[in-house]
Amino acid sequence: MVRHFGVGFYSVFPVSKRVAVCSKHQDDNQYKWEPESCEKFTVKADDSGTIHCGGTDITLYLKDDQLAFLEEDRLKNLIIQHAKIISYPMSLYIIERTEKEIDYDVKHLIKTFDDSIPEDNWTAFFPITPYGETTKDMKMKVRKNRLSLSMKPDPIWLRNPQDITNEEYAAFCKSLTKDMEEHLAVKHFSIEGQVKFKCILFVPKKASFGLYDTGKKLEYIRLYVQNVFVMDNNHELIPERLSFVKGIVDTDNYPLDSPPEALHQDKTFNFIRHNLANKCIELFSEMAENQDDYKLFYEAFSDNIKLCLHEDCSNKKITELLRYHSTESGDELTSLKDYVTRMEGGQSDIYYIVGESKKAVENSPFVDTLKTMGYEVLFMVDTIDTLIMDQLNEFEGKNFQSANQESVKKMKLG
């Protein structure tokens, strides 16, 4: 059900025995959607006329053990909590039913009674006599919608990061990504200058379903302009190799009047795109300081990191993100920086071997020879590693050298 409805709407089912959604476009009729089971639902025309101009009503018929959600204080607390992460105004109206004495002719009673104060929003339920005679001292039941709470939007991305808790970030990420799992890392920042924008980036714990499916439409970075939602599927705003990163961008300068095919030529657009890519790499580098978190991240998105390096092989920050097994690392992964730290005195090259699997390369006779000579060898077992090594020449002044017959022969002669 989460897959069909998303986390937000799914949350109505555990507390409701019945759900009804009435929706109306301003230029169309009103329709009602009701689920019959987890897999079936009905959609039919609805002539109740509860929606006048257009919009959507969601009615929950709560289960007997969930009636606490009808308590005013409980609802207030929920609204206050979620107003911090939702960019729409929210109001809570409490229906109050009372009796009001009236002295009118019945012909006036059959009409809806409106109080003199419009915002009171009185609705009447009339006792009508069968013959239409004048009724005296009649009491009319009336219903009044009392405004209990009104919360203006307080978007989390516009607040000071120091004032936001991890729980608030987690709640916002779930509402944004429709993912039940908490995020792995978050980066909240703002860019000032000729182009201004605020942004929150989230890194998930694992790749979302369909991430590598080129035919699947993905939601990338959600774009707001001056706190107004614009789009959530602009795949040009962030490089495709970083499409697993989700988040929000809110700017005052976005070129809304530019056609999509011309955006890549717009200076403002390219400025935002360039900064988002750099901030993503910066976030990954910060994650690398926590070995456990980075291990989860690298297992899920190592291919994406290598694609980043393939497209920008001169970027040392991306190179530092690489991790490999080696003859010295055992079951753990090692970074190039740690490899250089362990190099023996006089060693000028970083040795690596490319193969189909770790088991295949660690049994190579060339690896055994280099180990005997005291040199550590990196195991590169992904197809893209070959492409990377064709582009990378050195790291921190140390040349990359493939562990093959020629290199081993060279070492023996040396």
Image: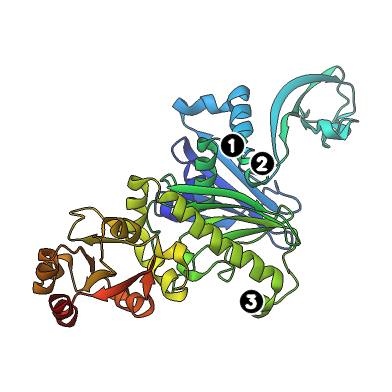
At horizontal 21% and vertical 61% (from top left) the residue drawn is: 326
Quarter of the figure with residue 307: bottom left
Q: What residue type is labelled 1?
A: Ile
Dot 3 crowding, Cα within 10 Å, few <14, some 14–19, many 20+: some
Left or right: 399, with 262 as reference point: left
At horizontal 63% and vertical 38% (from top left) the residue drawn is: 84
**Residue on which the image places disc 1:** 164
User: Relative to 317, does residue 283 appear above or below in the rendering?
Assistant: above
Q: Where is residue 100 in the image (x, y as percent from the top left)?
A: 81, 20
Marks 2 & 1, CB-CB < 8 Å contact? yes
In-front residue for pair 141/132: 141
In-front residue for pair 218/385: 385
Mark 2 or mark 3, earlier in chain: 2
Which of the numbered marks, if any, corresponds to residue 285? none
Number of residue marks: 3
Callout 1: helix, strand or loop? loop
At horizontal 60% and vertical 67% (from top left) the residue drawn is: 273
Marks 3 & 1, CB-CB < 8 Å contact? no
Q: Position of residue 403 (x, y in %)?
A: 19, 75
User: Relative to 353, does residue 18 appear above or below in the rendering?
Assistant: above
Q: Where is residue 184 in the image (x, y as percent from the top left)?
A: 42, 47
Which of the numbered marks, if any, corresponds to residue 264? 3
Between the residue at mark 2 and the residue at mark 1, the CA separation in whole angstroms equals 8 Å
In-front residue for pair 122/406: 406
Callout 2: helix, strand or loop? loop
